[in-house]
């Protein structure tokens, strides 16, 4: 399967009376975006108002509580459309051509549950820990209709963000990209013939699937309900995998992370040079132990069927998923497939405690995304997009976290994307 | 829905007790802490009952939520060392998190109950949303 990604470099974002890209500037008409968002039953039923704002790198701005971050993209050629199963129909995506508004992001904010959502600082020390301080952010603060339940609100905000990013991405449809990159994986036989001496490498992509508000969707399907299966790496670039995860700001994979999965990007970079990138195996992180056994058995079975020599495994979340991570490692290592794990750690504020809730001697190649318990102080910002009242109750916060001057003393886990377990951050070495 | 006759739910979450006790055997320990539930289940697993859900379900940290629900089997099946290990590691992880000193409002407490309940429903393949119709949960 072959996909061309056309990158349109966005240098600035401005509100306007039209949605368009001209000379590297993305113009956004909030009323047009809103009309598209509200053309959906859940958004209509559960979102009372949407306030749009723009946050740019270097500004004294704090965005919180962040729900999801989504990169605006648009399908230009080939089957299907962006975010299959949610915005587009369920045609298989990942081939043809897709345009990316590189440098722009849609950020949804809203208090789904009061204790878990994250912070993006656009400047200061906090900005160093989140990749979304470097993007031009179109922020949507979504207020619920009175009487809305959390799960309905979460679903409506999820749809709102995806629909907004899809609509805004449309502005790049007829624009000539600044750069076009081609991504292609080969069929099994073709790959072996073309790269007979290169190790066959796959990517076991673990998806957060523990329950309501802890979910991930694949082509619109709740990934709790899947067995481990195969995905062409390019399918993720068209939005085949979407975040429905409202918890654990530092190590949740936003939709932006899925679209820009760095493991996929690096494996493509090495494809045909030092390795033969065969495919992605997606699997879940269910709470029921029999589900864990089945999913890790199947992920290992597929890796063996594909005659892989090595797999990379990335995790999402804390605690329970550590068990899936280790099961995926042990089962592959025991059948002779070399395994490298990517995770983060909760190693205590001094970094001296055991970082994971599970371990095994076979897990001898592990990359960490950082220690989520690391203490940080975030200075006050001139402007807050969203609300701060929940900060003391947030993961990483404590009584008195929000100081009277607006500064925040907390653990790193409060920052969106700070210890991302795909490695999409700056807390590890290269 | 997963095998209700073979399992029991050990919980300190009143929402779980309210909604799921019509369907499952729920052992509700109203005064137990998060850690107390882990210790109870650890002892059951050491004594040979099957552990059926992961004790660290959810990304809400042990020093935040006060609620924990874990599913174990009703029959003695003998000691499973892997499950003993999971329970031991869960307690080590729990003890690693320092108390936060936060006083939670009733609103937050209900949200913590909801998260624990929905994780459990996810594990049991029980329709969490339908179940909520008989409970008093937060809305905006």
Image (cartoon, coloured by chain):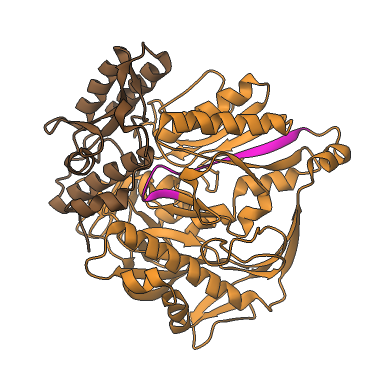
Chain colours: A orange, B brown
A85 lies left or right of A176: left
Q: Is residue A147 visible?
A: yes
As rendered, which of A231 and A393 lies closer to the eye?
A231
Q: Which residue is drawn at 53% across and 74% down?
A: A167
Q: Is residue A58 visible?
A: no
In the displayed structure, A173 sits above or below A240; it is below
Q: Residue furthest front?
A: B5
Q: In which quarter of the image is the C terminus of chain B?
A: bottom left
- Residue A338 on image: x %, y %: 66, 26
Q: Quadrant of the N terminus of chain B?
A: top left
Q: Give the range drawn in magenta.
A: A199-215
Location of residue B39 (image quadrant) = top left
Q: Which residue lies furthest to the bottom in this view?
A: A17
- Residue B9 on image: x %, y %: 26, 31
Q: Residue furthest left?
A: B31
- Residue B24 on image: x %, y %: 25, 34
Look at the image and say whether residue A157 sits in the magenta stretch: no
């Amino acid at each position: 399967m072959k996909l061309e990604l056309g990158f349109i470099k966005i240098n600035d974002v401005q509100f306007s009376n039209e949605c368009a890209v001209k000379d590297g500037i993305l113009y956004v008409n909030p009323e047009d975006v809103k009309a598209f968002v509200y053309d959906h039953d859940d958004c209509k039923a559960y979102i009372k108002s949407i306030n749009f704002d723009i946050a740019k790198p270097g500004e004294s701005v704090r965005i919180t509580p962040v729900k999801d971050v989504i990169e605006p993209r648009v399908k230009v050629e080939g089957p299907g459309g962006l975010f299959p199963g949610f915005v587009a129909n369920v045609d298989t995506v990942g081939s043809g051509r897709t345009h990316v508004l590189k440098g722009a992001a849609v950020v949804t904010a809203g208090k789904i549950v009061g204790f878990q959502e994250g912070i993006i600082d656009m400047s200061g020390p906090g900005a160093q820990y989140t990749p979304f301080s470097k993007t031009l952010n179109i922020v949507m603060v979504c207020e619920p209709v009175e009487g809305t339940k959390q799960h309905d609100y979460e679903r409506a905000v999820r749809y709102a963000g995806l629909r907004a990013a899809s609509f805004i991405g449309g502005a790049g449809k007829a624009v000539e990209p600044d750069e076009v990159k081609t991504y292609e994986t080969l069929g099994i036989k073709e790959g072996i013939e073309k790269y007979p001496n290169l190790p066959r490498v796959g990517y076991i992509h673990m998806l957060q699937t523990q329950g309501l508000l802890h979910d991930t969707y694949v082509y619109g399907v709740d990934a709790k309900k899947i067995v481990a299966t195969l995905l062409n790496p390019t399918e993720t670039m068209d939005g085949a995998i979407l975040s429905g995860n409202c918890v654990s700001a530092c190590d949740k994979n936003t939709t932006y992370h899925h679209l820009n999965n760095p493991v996929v990007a690096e494996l493509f970079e090495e494809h045909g040079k030092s390795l033969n990138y065969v495919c992605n195996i997606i699997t879940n992180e269910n709470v029921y132990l029999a589900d864990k056994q089945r999913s890790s058995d199947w992920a290992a079975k597929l890796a063996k069927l594909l005659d892989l020599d090595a797999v990379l495994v990335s995790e999402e979340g804390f605690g329970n998923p550590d068990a899936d991570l280790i099961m995926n490692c042990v089962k592959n290592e025991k059948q002779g497939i070399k395994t490298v794990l990517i995770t983060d750690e909760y190693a205590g504020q001094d970094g001296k405690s055991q970082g994971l809730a599970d371990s095994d001697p076979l897990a001898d190649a592990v990359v960490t995304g950082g220690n989520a318990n690391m203490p940080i102080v975030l200075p006050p910002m001139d402007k807050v997009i969203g609300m701060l009242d929940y900060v003391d109750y947030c993961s990483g916060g404590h009584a008195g976290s929000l100081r009277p001057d607006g500064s925040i003393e907390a653990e790193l886990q409060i920052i969106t994307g700070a210890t991302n377990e795909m490695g999409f951050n700056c807390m590890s070495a290269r | 829905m997963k095998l209700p006759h073979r399992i029991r739910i050990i919980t300190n979450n009143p929402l779980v007790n309210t909604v799921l006790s019509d369907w499952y055997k729920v052992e509700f320990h109203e005064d137990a802490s998060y850690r107390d539930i882990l210790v109870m289940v650890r002892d059951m697993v050491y004594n040979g009952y099957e552990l059926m859900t992961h004790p660290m379900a959810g990304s809400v940290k042990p020093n935040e939520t006060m609620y924990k629900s874990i599913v174990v089997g009703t029959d003695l099946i003998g000691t499973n060392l892997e499950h003993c290990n999971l329970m031991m590691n869960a307690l080590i992880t729990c003890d690693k998190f320092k108390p936060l000193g936060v006083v939670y409002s009733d609103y937050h407490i209900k949200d913590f109950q909801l998260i624990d309940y929905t994780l459990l429903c996810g594990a049991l393949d029980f329709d969490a949303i339908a179940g909520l119709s008989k409970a008093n949960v937060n809305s905006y």
